């Protein structure tokens, strides 16, 4: 076993490695005077840069938190490495061969020095293996998949795309042949453990390397290609010492320099979307890896964008400035809009102005590039709108602004969104905008509604735990409400008969999805009138509805189904979702349960049909005899069809 690294080799690493390059891979640095660079500290959250680097002396220091040291200390701190692993990583970047003392002990008790380097080497060799496989005859399906989406061999090479052969141990045998032990391969996440031993984790799949900002491959994402593959559509590396999905962004290694230069990052939803964006000229695109965009991703983005609130950034209402912009792109369907609203929960985790770009036809960037070319992809990003505006307008869209009742309801729903804006200069601007979008001349009334919404969380407890009632990490010290609309919407009174039907229907959908009739998936997005229950319904729809639930339950049971819905739900809804999934049902006898579930869901469908009948009769009455005969016939035909549907429901 290797011992300690020779002291002279450690000193050589310090001399040969440029600290500004290593730090610059994590932090956007700019000149701070002769011989000095500065940026946002990667070790604590700050708005003004206090982290300084002096390349000539090879040292860094943060005047905010006091962290400092040389390039080895920086790598240890930022990547969580031991001393030996940090030196080995830097030596590999500098092309140095390290020497070790005879008989020296390991850098960490019980662990061989250089384990991280060994795991990184395993991933590098695995990536080479997958890329070599892509050109072989067995990878025809993988090449066809890429070609169908407009990606040629050059694109595959640029993004390191490869193919995992269908056999059980192709990569395993290859890595064993390169001297890796079973223990190392198990820890790496490249293989899985079965009753008969270990085998390749990825088999018969198209494979993308997932790299750290430094360019080191730490994991893989793999797409199913063959019908006989019963696994998930996308399969990622599990959590390992190298790979934590909440800390990695696909494409960050390719985008980091453009992000720093353009002061912009575009967040998309998949690997092919990143490829399409980059090939269309949007070279700041990245994607999360099997998880929602979260606070750790935000910190990575902030450091690269150089988000500092300093002069020269994007100018906001009220005169404040930010260091760049974050653009979330989502599909134009309901699931994409849900994802955009969920991103709103992370918007104020950083000060960069945040936008959303939604492709209204429902195409993702990859499909958009194929259908309309690179110009359309660039135009999508150019069409971005502020995320605050998007969330407010999405909230208003659920209300009929032609009626006084609709405008009042819209104000009540949108006021908490505006109240969640922590920028005291920006909030009044959106109060005025909200008044205009509502068609209200009374801006003061809108301001009162927003002020009431800001006070609401402190006036009365909401459903869920005390923890759910408090502010999320990173919220403002003045107690401003969490910037997610449903976080301030109380669970409806159970004495409300309509709300009780909505609640019970959602309970059975979560607890017994295989018994729920298909009519549930045909419900309109606004089938649940209570905002909290509508948020749960949206999460169910985003998870694929009852059609998807049956497949999920078949593979992993009801627990997996609830987990799938939780994954799609905004964080403030999690407590309610959990409550609904465990609430006792009035009827739990096995022989009666199917009929009870069906009856509960059909009652909710009945309410929705009745609501549509009432709306249709109102339209017919308002139009009256003045309406053209063709319009009258159409309205009457629609009403007759709805009446027949309701009779069918009530006789079922």
Image (cartoon, rainbow, N blue to C red):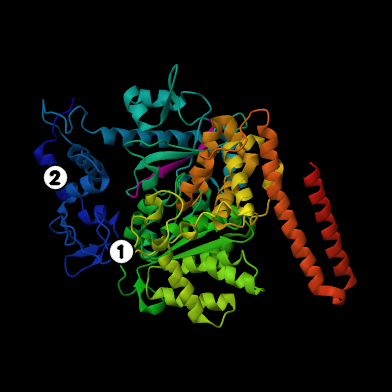
Give SS at disc 1.
loop
Q: Tell me: residue 116, above or below residue 443.
A: above
Question: Where's residue 330, x and y in %?
Answer: 54, 57
What number of labels is visible?
2
**What is the distance, in whole Å, between disc 2 and disc 1 at their CAs?**
47 Å
Between 333 and 345, the residue placed more toward the observer is 345
| Residue identifier under label 2 | 12
Q: Mark 1 = which residue?
A: 477
**Residue drawn at 51 percent across, 38 percent down:** 582
Secondary-structure class at tag 2:
helix
Tell me, yes or no, whether the highlighted magenta stretch contains residue 210. Answer: yes
Would residue 82 be found to the left or right of residue 518 on screen? left
The magenta stretch is 204-213
Which quadrant of the rendered structure holds the C terminus? Answer: top right
The structure residue drawn at horizontal position 20% and vertical position 68%, both measured from the top left corner, is 32
Q: Residue at x 43, y 39 (%)?
A: 220
Q: Position of residue 557 (x, y in %)?
A: 55, 31
């Amino acid at each position: 076993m290797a011992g300690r690294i020779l002291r002279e080799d450690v000193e050589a690493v310090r001399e040969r490695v440029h600290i500004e390059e290593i730090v610059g891979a994590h932090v956007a640095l700019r000149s701070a005077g002769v011989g000095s660079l500065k940026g946002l500290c990667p070790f604590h959250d700050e708005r003004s840069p206090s982290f300084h680097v002096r390349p000539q002396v090879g040292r860094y220091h943060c005047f905010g938190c006091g962290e400092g040291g040389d390039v080895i200390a920086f790598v240890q701190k930022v990547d969580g490495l031991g001393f030996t692993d940090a030196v080995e990583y830097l030596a590999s970047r500098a092309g140095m061969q390290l020497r070790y003392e005879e008989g020296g002990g390991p850098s960490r008790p019980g662990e061989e020095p250089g384990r991280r380097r060994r795991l990184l080497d395993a991933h590098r060799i695995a990536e080479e293996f997958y890329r070599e496989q892509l050109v072989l005859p067995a990878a025809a399906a993988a090449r066809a998949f890429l070609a169908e989406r407009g990606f040629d061999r050059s694109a595959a090479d640029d993004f390191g795309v490869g193919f995992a052969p269908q056999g059980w141990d192709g990569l395993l045998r290859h890595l064993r042949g390169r001297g890796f032990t079973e223990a190392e391969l198990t820890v790496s996440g490249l293989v899985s453990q079965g009753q008969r031993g270990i085998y390749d984790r990825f088999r018969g799949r198209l494979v993308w390397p997932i790299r750290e900002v430094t360019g080191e491959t730490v994991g893989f994402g793999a797409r199913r290609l063959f019908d006989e593959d019963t696994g998930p559509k996308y399969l990622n590396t599990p959590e390992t010492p190298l790979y934590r999905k909440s800390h990695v962004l696909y494409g960050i290694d390719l985008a980091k320099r453009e992000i720093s230069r353009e002061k912009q990052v575009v967040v998309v939803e998949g690997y092919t979307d990143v490829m399409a964006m980059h090939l269309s000229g949007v070279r700041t695109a990245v994607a999360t890896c099997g998880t929602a965009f979260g606070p750790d991703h935000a910190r990575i983005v902030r450091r690269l964008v150089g988000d500092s609130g300093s002069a020269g950034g994007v100018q906001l209402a009220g005169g404040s400035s930010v260091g760049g912009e974050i653009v979330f792109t989502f599909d134009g369907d309901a699931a994409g809009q849900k994802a955009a609203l969920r991103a709103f929960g992370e918007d104020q985790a950083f000060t960069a102005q945040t936008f959303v770009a939604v492709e209204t036809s429902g195409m993702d960037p990859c499909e958009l590039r194929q259908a309309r070319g690179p110009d359309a992809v660039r135009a999508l990003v150019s069409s971005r709108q502020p995320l605050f505006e998007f969330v407010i307008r999405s909230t208003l869209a659920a209300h009929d602004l032609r009626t006084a009742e609709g405008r009042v309801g819209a104000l009540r729903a949108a006021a908490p969104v505006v109240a969640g804006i922590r920028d005291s200069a920006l909030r009044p601007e959106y109060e005025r905008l909200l008044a205009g979008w509502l068609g209200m001349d009374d801006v003061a009334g809108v301001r009162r509604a927003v002020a009431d919404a800001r006070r609401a969380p402190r006036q009365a407890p909401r459903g869920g735990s005390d923890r759910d009632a408090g502010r999320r990490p990173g919220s403002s010290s003045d107690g401003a409400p969490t910037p997610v609309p449903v976080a301030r919407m109380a669970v409806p009174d159970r004495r409300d008969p309509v709300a009780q039907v909505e609640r019970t229907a959602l309970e059975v959908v979560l607890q017994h999805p295989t018994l729920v009739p298909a009519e549930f998936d045909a419900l309109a997005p606004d089938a649940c009138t209570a905002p909290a229950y509508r948020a749960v319904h949206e999460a169910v729809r985003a998870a694929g509805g009852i059609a998807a639930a049956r497949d999920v339950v078949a593979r992993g049971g009801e627990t997996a189904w609830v987990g799938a819905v939780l994954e799609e739900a905004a964080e403030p809804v999690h407590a309610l979702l959990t409550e609904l999934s465990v609430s006792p049902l009035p009827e739990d006898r096995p022989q009666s349960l199917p009929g009870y579930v069906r009856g509960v869901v059909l009652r909710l469908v009945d309410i929705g049909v009745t609501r549509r009948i009432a709306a249709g009769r109102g339209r017919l009455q308002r139009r009256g005899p003045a309406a053209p005969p063709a319009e009258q016939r159409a309205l009457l035909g629609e009403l007759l069809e709805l009446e027949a549907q309701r009779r069918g429901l009530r006789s079922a």
